[in-house]
Image (spheres, rainbow, N blue to C red):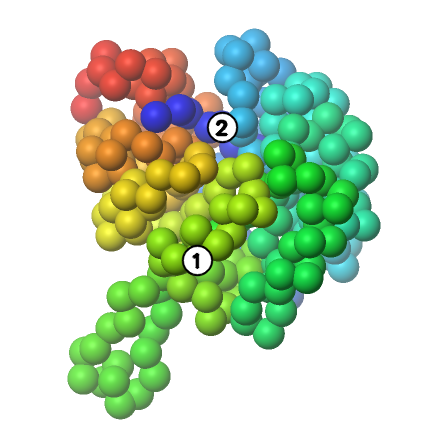
Amino acid sequence: MEFRPCIDIHNGKVKQIVGGSLRDGQDSAAENFVSGQDAAFYAEFYKSRGIRGGHVILLNAKDSPYYMETKEQALRALRAYPGGLQVGGGITPDNAQEFLEAGASHVIVTSYVFRDGRVDYGNLEKLLAVTGRERLVLDLSCRRKALPAPDADRGMMDNAYYIVTDRWQKFTEERITTELLDRLSSFADEFLIHAVDVEGKASGIERELVELLGGWKRIPVTYAGGVGSFSHLAQLKEWGQDHLHVTVGSALDLFGGSMAFDQVLQFCRKGNGAEE
């Protein structure tokens, strides 16, 4: 298990938010933490610790009045740690090269590769023409979908995890299955998967999703969402068969939480040395 750090940028500031609360209309989100430091500060911190593979996420839509400020923060982070960070949020073939030239090791893409709720393999090929497979991460962040009445009224649930796009606000028809992971793995170097319903809540990880991902072992997968204690990290290691990498956000003392950064790093590297 590797620790993969994060730098989430919203309205031009580094933040930790509740993932499912993000709304484009008013550029709003429920905030757990708003940093007084810029994105480059965190990039330099991760660089000083020798931690690679973290993700910088732009959480504003391109038509937001905050987008350019958010983008500038992301570019500062990439320039501060060239080759050490991945970047995602509104990536297309038109702007991927700019972020790669600014220092991103990979670009992270979700929304561009879906059309009408399905994977658009033509768009994937267009991305690959710019990035190559070795510099592309597919973000397959997902959440469960409520069933319509009358099924919902009878207490029935759809237990599948559906990929969501547009900053986790729009459901696709694509479910996380081993078959889908198999197909998409030929296009990407890694997968990044947020469990959106627990993202930013530090309330526990999604066991069913973790077990599915942990049993699939073709390319690296980073899981994010719900980690709030060292017992959660131990569960992730066990249920994910020690195959998944992990992102911890709001629970870290770096972002106002209670989990000591150095202990988290030690746990991920060695699997011990941290107390509940």
Q: Which residue is mark 1?
A: 180
Q: Position of residue 127 (x, y in %)?
A: 71, 49
Examine the rendered structure and indicate whether residue 55 appears above or below residue 157.
Answer: above
Give the quadrant of the C terminus. top left
Q: Which residue is mark 2?
A: 5
Q: Does residue 252 show up?
A: yes
Q: Quadrant of residue 247?
A: top left
Most extreme residue toward the top, as rendered? 48
Q: Nearer the viewer, residue 30 or 184?
A: 184
Q: Quadrant of residue 3?
A: top left
Marks 1 and 2 in Cβ contact (< 8 Å): no
Amino acid identity at mark 1:
Leu
Q: Position of residue 29 (x, y in %)?
A: 53, 53
Mark 1: few, some, or many residues within 10 Å (few <14, many ≥20)? few
Q: Nearer the viewer, residue 260 or 84?
A: 84
Examine the rendered structure and indicate whether residue 192 appears above or below residue 86.
Answer: below
Distance CA(mark 1)–CA(mark 2): 26 Å
Give the quadrant of the N terminus. top left
Numbered disc 2: secondary structure: loop
Residue 211 placement, left or right of 12: left
Q: Position of residue 125 (x, y in %)?
A: 69, 54
Q: Which mark is residue 156?
A: none
